[in-house]
Image (cartoon, grey):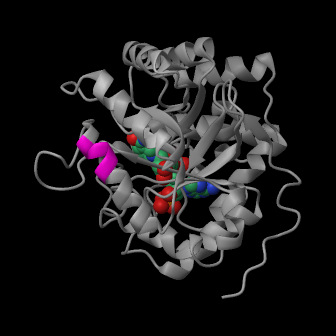
């Protein structure tokens, strides 16, 4: 398939500096956790990836285990980055991660040097890449010494297999400790990736640590997997994540309380002249460098990038949101 990127793609997306680094990330990034595995339609994956890039999304987020099956999202991405997107490699920031269960035996997960280095080598092969832009340790490991995980990240940087390193799902204390260990090696942690949205605010203390340290932040599940859209306001549609096989968003997790909050937030979003998804993304971007959205179709990505048209909130709007969320 011949593909020529939209020449207006850089006109509207804001690119924001990632902490005290030289790297800028698009306000909206795209993640391949769901809907890009080998059970997904390749033509739809391709349409979403190319469509996202045409809208100014330069950052794609992956992990070793994204699928299903585990690893297949990287393979899908590999097909597109070695095909239509190949001429644009230097315009893209591609991230992957290791730390969650990926293969059997004692080395297939957590934070040892063995796990991180072999996993990244596998990811590079699946994606047909020489390097990724950002490599993350996906979750803290209670047993491996931080020094060893940091040493693995250092080796990955020095080998050129990643340009920057980051951490994900670390608590405030774990984050401070890792930043210190990396700092002693002369390594700046670029970014922390955490669950953050109007419905998930437990990581605000991590954001405080990052702001203080000049480390960038990127929110995952900024739409609470679809709850912060108008999708579930009138029940569970058959083509939604909650109606599918995801163990991460089950039908039971669509509670009446959350749906009521979404409906009230939806009213405010309409008054602001945007959709609930757009308002939820703009809200998360008050605190973070970028948000990683997921999508099952291009039209969602098109709607979501519209968040950048109205990013600011009045004091009164902020208060109304706090009241709705506290209910
Ligand atoms: P979101 O909260 O953005 O949820 C995405 C889902 O919401 C879509 O798949 C779609 O679901 C629905 N949706 C999105 N936009 C709209 C819209 N405009 N209208 C209606 N429905 C919409 O993010 P994800 O939960 O997908 O996570 C995003 C990324 O974050 C992942 O791909 C991954 O890269 C990263 N991540 C990182 C983790 C970590 O541990 N570091 C953990 C989890 C995620 P539907 O299928 O129902 O249409």
Q: As drawn, is 43 to the left or to the right of 69?
A: right
Q: Residue at x 49, y 70 (%)?
A: 78
Q: Is residue 178 left or right of residue 30?
A: left
Quarter the N terminus occupies: bottom right
| Residue at position x 55%, y 81% in the image | 43
Q: Residue at x 38, y 20 (%)?
A: 171
Percent of width and height locating residue 296: 52, 65
Q: Residue furthest bottom?
A: 1
Between 13 and 99, the residue placed more toward the observer is 99
318 relative to 41, above or below? above
Using the rendered view, name the quadrant where residue 215 is placed. Answer: top right
Residue 238 visible in rendering: no
Q: Nearer the viewer, residue 36 or 85?
A: 85
- Is the residue 40 above or below the residue 233 in the image? below
Of residues 303 and 188, the one nearer the viewer is 188
Q: Residue furthest left?
A: 105
Q: Give residue 119's position: percent from left, percent from top.
A: 32, 52
Residue 132 visible in the snapshot: yes
Rendered residue at 38%/12% (across/down): 173
Between 276 and 152, the one nearer to me in the picture: 152
State which region is magenta: 114-118
Q: Is residue 123 shown above or below 319?
A: below
Q: How would you classify the magenta stretch by its main secondary structure?
A: helix
């Amino acid at each position: 398939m011949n593909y020529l990127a939209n020449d207006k793609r850089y006109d509207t997306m804001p690119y924001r500096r990632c902490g005290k680094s030289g790297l800028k990330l698009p306000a909206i990034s795209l993640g391949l956790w769901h809907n890009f595995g080998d059970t997904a339609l390749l033509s739809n994956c391709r349409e979403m990836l190319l469509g996202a890039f045409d809208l100014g999304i330069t950052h794609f987020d992956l992990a070793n285990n994204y699928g299903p099956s585990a690893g297949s999202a990287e393979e899908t991405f590999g097909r597109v980055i070695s095909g239509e997107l190949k001429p644009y490699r230097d315009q893209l920031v591609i991230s992957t991660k290791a730390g969650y269960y990926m293969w059997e035996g004692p080395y297939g997960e957590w934070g040892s040097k063995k796990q991180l280095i072999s996993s990244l080598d596998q990811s590079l092969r699946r994606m047909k890449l020489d390097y990724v832009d950002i490599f993350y340790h996906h979750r803290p490991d209670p047993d491996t010494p931080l020094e060893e995980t940091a040493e693995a990240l250092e080796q990955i940087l020095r080998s050129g297999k990643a340009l920057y390193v980051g951490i994900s799902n670390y608590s405030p204390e774990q984050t401070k400790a890792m930043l210190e260990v990396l700092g002693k090696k002369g390594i700046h942690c670029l970014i922390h990736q955490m669950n953050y949205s109007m419905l998930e605010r437990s990581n605000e203390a991590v954001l405080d640590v990052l702001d203080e340290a000049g480390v960038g932040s990127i929110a995952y599940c900024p739409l609470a997997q679809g709850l912060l859209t108008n999708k579930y306001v009138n029940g569970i549609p058959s083509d939604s994540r909650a109606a599918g096989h995801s163990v991460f968003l089950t039908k039971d997790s669509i509670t009446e309380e959350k749906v009521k909050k979404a409906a009230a937030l939806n009213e405010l979003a309409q008054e602001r002249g945007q959709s609930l998804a757009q308002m939820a993304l703009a809200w998360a971007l008050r605190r973070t460098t970028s948000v990683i959205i997921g999508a099952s179709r291009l039209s969602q990505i098109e709607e979501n990038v519209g968040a950048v048209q109205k990013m600011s909130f009045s004091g009164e709007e902020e208060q109304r949101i706090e009241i709705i969320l506290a209910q």
